[in-house]
Amino acid sequence: MIALFRARGRVQGVGYRAFVLSHARVLDLAGWVRNDLDGTVCGEAEGSPEALEAFRVALRGGPPWAHVSALDWSASPGAQSLPRPFEVRR
């Protein structure tokens, strides 16, 4: 299963990408995360439906210094060849 996500709010400069990376690796997800120029953080993740749901819940909360005002999330069945291990893109 593949999920596309975009976190909005105070998510840059607060360790959000490192938080995403850490949770993705614990959940054994493939994929990537990056900062976008519009101030959001986006990415793709691939894994089991259960792991992706746990990931979605974690992303909605974020690290202590972040404030996630919205999490856009779109999941669909299927597989891609996303990077493994999960990575931060610049």
Image: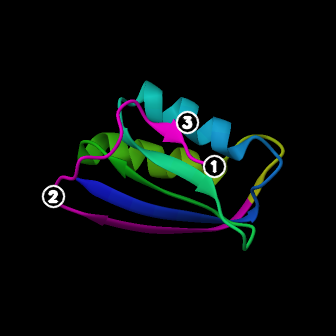
Work out whether mark 1 precedes mark 2 in sequence or the reverse, and give the earlier one. 2
Give the side of residue 29 with respect to residue 12, left or right.
Answer: left
Residue displayed at 50% across by 37% down: 87
Q: CA distance from mark 2 to mark 3?
A: 22 Å
Tag 1 residue: 90
Q: Residues within 10 Å of mark 1 (few under 14, many from 20)?
A: few
- Identity of the amino acid at label 1? Arg
The amino acid beneath tag 2 is Gly
- The residue nearer to you, when weighing 39 against 55, is 39
Per the model, the C-alpha gap separating discs 1 and 2 is 26 Å
Q: Badge 2 local density, few (<14 within 10 Å), some, or many (20+)?
A: few
CB atoms of marks 2 and 3 within 8 Å: no
Query: Considering only order in the chain, which callout, 1 or 3, is on the residue closer to the N terminus?
Result: 3
Q: Separation of disc 3 and disc 1 at Cα?
A: 13 Å
Residue identified by numbered label 2: 78
Query: What span is in magenta?
Result: 68-90
* Residue 35 place in picture, x, y as percent: 67, 57
Query: Which secondary structure, mark 3?
Result: helix
Instruction: State the image coordinates of residue 17 (x, y, percent, origin top left).
Output: 65, 44
Residue at point 56%, 30% (across, down)? 22
Q: Residue at x 47, y 52 (%)?
A: 56
Mark number displayed over residue 21 = 3
Verify CB contact (< 8 Å) between mark 3 and mark 1: no
What secondary structure is found at the residue carrying circle 2? loop
Looking at the picture, which amino acid does disc 3 mark? Leu
